[in-house]
Image: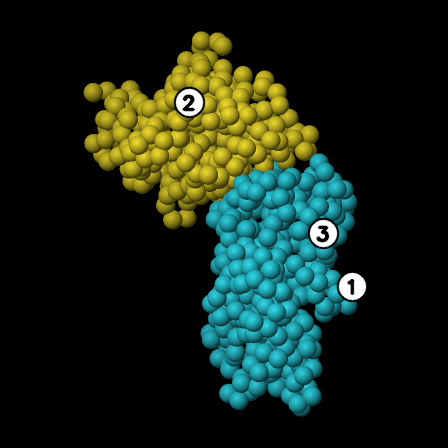
């Protein structure tokens, strides 16, 4: 068990050694986002911008304009939410080489409550042209995603989480930008998932297997650009899908999958996610139950979608 | 400074005013008032103060210019064309489908444009980032950024003003084109931003107050800005919206309106471009 934000901090500090152009900006949350590791090693390349996210994103765009590779971190709601228009105008529109890497995405932020739980960020980042959106499943994938973002020239949004999460990928897993990944085989239906919901889907698939139901799990690490082929293939081969994300059912992964299938291959589908509500205070595990994001919820969705095949 | 050189720059600014009204007349869309109020400062930058190379727009050692009040794009476009960044004929395609001369500056298409601006309040942050990055790379290049006075109503400007002083960006020079008007009327009545100089001073900036149409004063202030160590400099330039064409002067109504045929002729007459 390891938090994706921890993997981010370590990877960034390592990349800082290899690439002198990498600079990091944070808005007074470097201890939480783990950019403090980079700051300690490379103080001259770390800029604490104070509690001023709009200016932080604009400053990053300027750094990119003179050849630097800025990584920008704060909580997801303040990056995607507070600074949305700066990300659109100053970063995505000019295709600036800026990496927006917030932590504390989704409801598992926990006790801080609805003000701090971003349930819309994937949707609003995905809607911006030129933007790449990545939601890693675990620490290992985070490492690969951060490396890939540093190597890619253009804007990237990587949504990370606060809590320790189970391992999905083995050490040395090769992250491929824009590629989905089958993490469990299956023939009766497919779970199409992103972020922490991939681990939940693997547990759900094990529960279903005991009932004689064969569920495939396809992890979508890059929500945009979407790996259309792996989703169309799963729709063709299994004939039913359940999407799952720690995010609103409006605009995120489930919307991306529905948009694709509605145009190319209509298939029975059920969306598991937060149903147009704000988050609330509580322990992370309690909130996953409260919002219906547990393996048992995925099992129920699977049974319902199978009934529609 | 050499009187002949000042006269040359004043003549250049006059030519660029002619170019602005012709360009806007052709496109029948764009911002007349704020382009004319800014052009003397833009002229001083491109033809006197900045180190740049139109033959090699991406030359690493160049000084950078950010037009934060991006709606004054015609002022930057005519200066870039005059300097040789692209053919002057391109100006006739301003705001047309397929043209690199977008309604607001676009670094993706126009040589000499460093970043994308137009959404007010964002340019100073980007200029800060450039200044930080250039200093980090040990480059002596300077960064100039032009803001409107109405634009100072955007909160991000003050986040950026705080950061520029905090990071002691003495390679940065901001200019405020204080023409005292915005779309809805007088800045003072819409949302007073004054006293501008005192505000920047309180934020830790070196402040120079000048007449934004006095070429000698503009050049002297820009050259003086480089000498202040340990803090960013801002030129608070008092200007006249629509400067150079009496019909456009001091009028908020010409903020976002292009000249019609009659107004073009009148403007060319005022600017000494045609005989009565």
Badge 1, how many Cα within 10 Å: few under 14, some, many 20+?
A: few
- How far apart in space, not on screen, are marks 1 and 2 (Cα)? 58 Å
Palette colour of chain B: yellow
- Looking at the image, is mark 3 or mark 2 nearer the viewer? 3
Query: Residue A298 — which label?
Result: none
Residue nearer the viewer, B223 or A58:
A58
Q: Position of residue B82 (x, y in %)?
A: 44, 28
**First in sequence: mark 1 vs mark 3:** 3
What chain does mark 2 sit on?
B
Please give the residue where the numbered disc 1 appears in the rendered image. Answer: A172
At a point 71% along the width and 63% down the height, the residue shown is A164
Please give the residue where the numbered disc 3 appears in the rendered image. Answer: A9
Q: Where is residue A198 in the image (x, y as percent from the top left)?
A: 65, 71
Residue nearer the viewer, B243 or A285:
A285
Query: Residue B237 — which label?
Result: 2
Q: Which element carries disc 2, helix, strand or loop? A: strand
Image-quadrant location for residue B180: top left
Image-quadrant location for residue B120: top left
> Is residue B138 at least partly visible in the picture?
yes
């Amino acid at each position: 068990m390891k938090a994706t934000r921890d993997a981010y901090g370590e990877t960034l500090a390592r990349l800082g050694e290899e690439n002198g152009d990498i600079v990091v900006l944070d808005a007074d949350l470097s201890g939480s986002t783990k950019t403090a590791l980079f700051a300690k090693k490379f103080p001259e390349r770390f800029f604490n911008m104070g509690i001023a996210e709009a200016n932080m994103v604009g400053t990053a765009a300027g750094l990119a304009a003179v050849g630097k590779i800025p990584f920008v971190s704060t909580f997801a709601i303040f990056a995607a939410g507070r600074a949305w228009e700066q990300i659109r105008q100053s970063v995505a529109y000019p295709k600036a080489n800026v990496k927006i890497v917030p932590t504390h995405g989704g409801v598992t932020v926990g006790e801080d409550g609805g003000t701090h739980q971003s349930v819309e960020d994937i949707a609003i980042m995905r809607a911006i042209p030129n933007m790449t959106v990545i939601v890693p499943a675990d620490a290992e994938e985070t490492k690969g995603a951060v490396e890939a973002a540093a190597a890619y020239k253009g804007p990237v949004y990587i949504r990370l989480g606060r809590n320790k999460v189970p391992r999905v990928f083995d050490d040395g897993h090769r992250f491929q930008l824009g590629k989905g990944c089958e993490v469990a085989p299956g023939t009766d239906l497919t779970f199409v998932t992103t972020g922490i919901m991939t681990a939940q889907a693997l547990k759900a698939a094990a529960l279903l297997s005991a009932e004689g139901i064969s569920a495939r799990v396809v992890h979508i690490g890059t929500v945009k650009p979407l790996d259309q082929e792996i989703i169309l293939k799963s729709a063709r081969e299994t004939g039913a899908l359940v999407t799952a994300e720690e995010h609103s059912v409006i605009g995120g992964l489930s919307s991306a999958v529905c948009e694709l299938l509605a145009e190319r291959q209509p298939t029975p589908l059920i969306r598991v996610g937060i149903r147009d509500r704000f988050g609330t205070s509580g322990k992370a595990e309690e909130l996953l139950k409260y919002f219906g994001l547990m393996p048992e919820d995925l099992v129920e969705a699977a049974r319902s979608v199978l009934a529609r095949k | 400074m050499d009187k002949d050189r000042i006269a040359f720059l004043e003549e250049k600014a006059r030519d660029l005013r002619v170019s602005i009204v012709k360009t806007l007349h052709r496109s029948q869309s764009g911002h007349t008032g704020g382009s004319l109020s800014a052009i003397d400062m833009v002229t001083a930058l491109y033809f006197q103060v900045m180190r740049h190379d139109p033959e090699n727009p991406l030359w690493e050692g160049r000084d950078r210019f950010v037009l934060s009040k991006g709606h004054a794009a015609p002022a930057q476009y005519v200066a870039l064309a005059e300097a040789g960044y692209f053919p002057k004929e391109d100006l006739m395609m301003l705001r047309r489908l397929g043209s690199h001369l977008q309604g607001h500056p676009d670094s993706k298409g126009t040589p000499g444009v460093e970043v994308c601006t137009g959404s007010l309040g964002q340019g100073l942050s980007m200029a800060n980032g450039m200044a930080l990055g250039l200093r980090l790379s040990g480059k002596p290049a300077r960064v100039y950024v032009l803001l409107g006075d109405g634009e100072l109503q955007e909160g991000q400007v003050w986040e950026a003003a705080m950061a520029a002083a905090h990071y002691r960006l003495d390679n940065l020079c901001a200019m405020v084109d204080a023409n005292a008007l915005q779309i809805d009327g007088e800045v003072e009545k819409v949302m007073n931003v004054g006293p501008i100089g005192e505000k920047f001073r309180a934020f830790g900036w070196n402040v120079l107050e000048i007449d934004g149409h006095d070429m000698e004063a503009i050049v002297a202030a820009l050259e003086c800005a480089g000498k202040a160590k340990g803090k960013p400099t801002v030129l608070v330039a008092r200007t006249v919206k629509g400067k150079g064409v009496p019909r456009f002067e001091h009028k908020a109504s010409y903020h976002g309106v292009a000249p019609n045929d009659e107004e073009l002729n009148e403007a060319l007459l005022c600017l000494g471009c045609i005989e009565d």
